[in-house]
Amino acid sequence: MTGDAITVEGVRKRYGGTQALDGLGLTVARGTVHGVLGPNGAGKTTLVRILSTLLRPDGGRVEVAGHDVVRQAREVRARIGLLGQHAALDEELGGRQNLEMFGRLHHLGARHARVRAGELLERFGLADAGRKPVRSYSGGMRRRLDLAASLIGDRNGNGPQVLFLDEPTTGLDPRGRAEVWSAVRSLVGGGTTVVLTTQYLEEADQLADRISVVDRGRVIADGTADELKALTGGDRIDVVLRDAALLGTVVALLPLPERDITVDPDRRLLSAPVTDRMAALSGVVRALEAAGVEAEDVALRRPTLDEVFLHLTGQDDRTKEAV
């Protein structure tokens, strides 16, 4: 066993003429949340299927929780949990009944399944709703119950060593996402390692200790959110004008390299990378005042993961999905 929960080296997988994974490699430290981002078709789903023993790689080496996913698949399955994109719950049954049913499917005895269901309902704040039919649950409650169901087969009650979450909050409102985020943080606090794929870059920013950006079957960047943001050139200055018609004029006025300025007419926004934060801010404010141009806002900020994604993958940020 290594000190990492997951080790992937040179993994390849082909579907007919399509190379889904092309020598991909990454490591995931124990007890952390590791985000996996990339455009559609980048290979993320294939990677998760290989990590969770649902798919055999064509080549390379993969270890999860200290065990080889091909030669020791049974040992890997005993140590992992998997939560897919869609809840696998019976709408007519109550939350407790669903968990007990999953427990029996995992070969727990009736008594053990009841005990585990009660523990998990308490752990995920669903004890009061345990007897209510799932069809009456909110989106956040359903996903918390689905998360609990992914842990039901753990016989020691401590949770799986590694949990794979494939877009766990897709379709949820902000409150529902926050509920799931809290549950994930609780699991990691208990020692579980989480691998997270998500279409919400904010989610990766909030939860992930490290992020791997995957494109064309390879990891093209890996690091903390701050490290990845630094790849885009550091801080940026944003200027929001009152009159969008002045955007072209203001580009020529600002004390910034014109080639670095991006323009978003719909938001009346000018944006550019800066190195000297305060000098850039004061220079922009003075230029606007001298020209008599009114700005709704002038602000310094760090790059977002959306901008990192666009920078690294070349995807249009209005159509990309980091899934």
Image: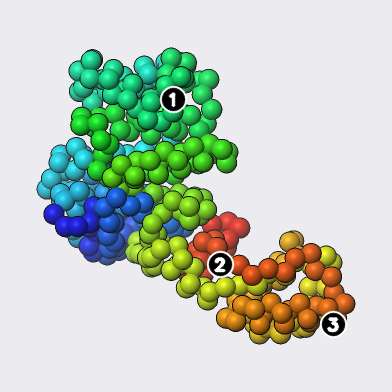
Residue 110 sits in which quadrant? top left
Q: Residues within 10 Å of mark 1 (few under 14, many from 20)?
A: many
Residue 265 appears anywhere in the view: no
Q: CA distance from mark 1 to mark 3?
A: 60 Å
**Residue nearest the observer in this picture, 130 or 319:** 130
Label located before the other in sequence (1 or 3): 1
Amino acid tagged 3: Ala
In the displayed structure, would residue 140 be above or below residue 2? above
Kindly identify which numbered label has been placed on residue 303: 2
Q: Residues within 10 Å of mark 2 (few under 14, many from 20)?
A: many
| Mark 1 secondary-structure assignment | loop
Position in image of residue 68 (x %, y %): 15, 51
Q: Which residue is mark 3?
A: 290
Kindly identify which numbered label has been placed on residue 126: 1
In the displayed structure, would residue 81 be above or below residue 264? above
Identify the residue shown where x is 61% and y is 77%: 277
Position in image of residue 241 (x %, y %): 79, 67
Amino acid tagged 2: Pro
Left/right of residue 320 with respect to residue 130 in the rendered view: right
Label located before the other in sequence (2 or 3): 3
Left/right of residue 321 with respect to residue 88 in the rendered view: right
Label located before the other in sequence (2 or 1): 1
Left/right of residue 109 with respect to residue 16 in the rendered view: left
Identify the residue shown where x is 15% and y is 49%: 67
Question: Which circle, 2 or 3, is nearer the viewer?
Answer: 3
Identify the residue shown where x is 42% and y is 21%: 127
